[in-house]
């Protein structure tokens, strides 16, 4: 399940240099000399370090309103990169007048690490865009922010990195 991770192209190039890739599905058990997976086993040793990269790293506290008197509880409110979402929390705090308005535009959601939450997060993104459109200054910021992966890329169309990927 997608958990919001991201990787740069340089890091992806490094990952692609890994030669010994095991594709035997999920790890079920690690012993001193054997890793048991769904579809087989591979050798290991007590000198090896094993890192569980699929573990849930993000907490799932009970959701609460993002904005309350004297308090902002930072939580996801749409599927996407955290840098864009949480920059928008600051922009909403600066541009909108009441906690009620801010909570209307930025209702929190659970991280999308289950099938249900994944679908809910996609629907929340649609609802979020609709609510954001009610506040032109916030919508304008979101649509032109370079942090928004779905924003207006027009001003960057002639940037050499963008042009190189078109060809």
Image: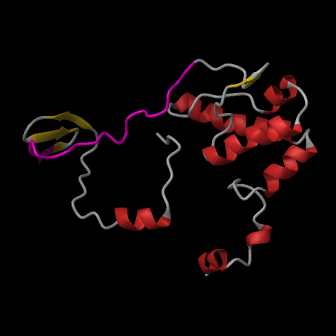
Residue at 28% across, 43% down:
25
Q: Give me the residue at 64% from left, 30% from top.
A: 75
Q: Which residues are magenta?
A: 41-61
> Majority secondary structure of the magenta segment?
loop
Side of 17 where 29 appears, left or right: left
Q: Please tell me which residue lies in front, 116 or 112.
A: 112
Compared across the picture, whether 60 is left or right of 93 comes to left
| Residue farthest along the front direction in this orientation | 70
Residue 84 is one of the magenta-drawn residues? no
Residue 64 relative to residue 24: left or right = right
The total of numbered circles placed on residues is 0
The image shows residue 72, relative to residue 165, as above or below, that is: above
Quarter the C terminus occupies: bottom right
The picture quadrant where one finds residue 41 is: top left
Could you say where residue 36 lies in the image, as x and y percent from the top left? 16, 38
Name the image colouring: secondary structure
Indicate the position of residue 91 as horizontal and vertical percent values.
80, 42
| Image quarter of residue 97 | top right
> Which x, y percent locates residue 43?
10, 47
- Whether residue 80 is visible here, answered yes or no, is no
Q: Residue at x 80, y 57 (%)?
A: 144
Magenta span includes 55: yes
Quadrant in the rendering for residue 13: bottom left
Please tell me which residue is depicted at 52% across the width and 32% down the height of the picture: 115
Q: Is residue 60 above or below residue 7?
A: above
Q: Is residue 158 visible?
A: yes
Q: Position of residue 138 (x, y in %)?
A: 86, 44
Q: In the figure, is residue 6 to the left or right of 128?
A: left
């Amino acid at each position: 399940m997608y958990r919001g991770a991201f990787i740069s192209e340089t890091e992806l190039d490094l990952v692609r240099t890994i030669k010994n890739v095991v594709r035997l599905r999920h790890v079920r058990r690690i012993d001193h000399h054997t890793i048991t997976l769904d579809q087989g086993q591979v050798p290991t040793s007590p000198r090896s370090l094993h890192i569980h990269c699929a573990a849930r790293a993000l907490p799932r506290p009970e959701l609460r309103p993002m904005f309350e008197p004297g308090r902002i509880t930072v939580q996801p409110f749409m599927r996407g990169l955290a840098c864009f979402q949480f920059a928008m929390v600051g922009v909403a705090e600066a541009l909108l007048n009441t906690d009620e308005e801010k909570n209307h535009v930025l209702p929190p959601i659970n991280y999308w690490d289950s099938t249900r939450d994944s679908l809910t997060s996609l629907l929340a993104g649609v609802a979020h865009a609709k609510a954001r459109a009610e506040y032109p200054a916030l919508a304008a910021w979101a649509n032109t922010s370079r942090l928004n992966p779905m924003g207006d890329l027009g001003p960057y169309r002639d940037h050499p990195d963008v042009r190189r990927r078109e060809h």
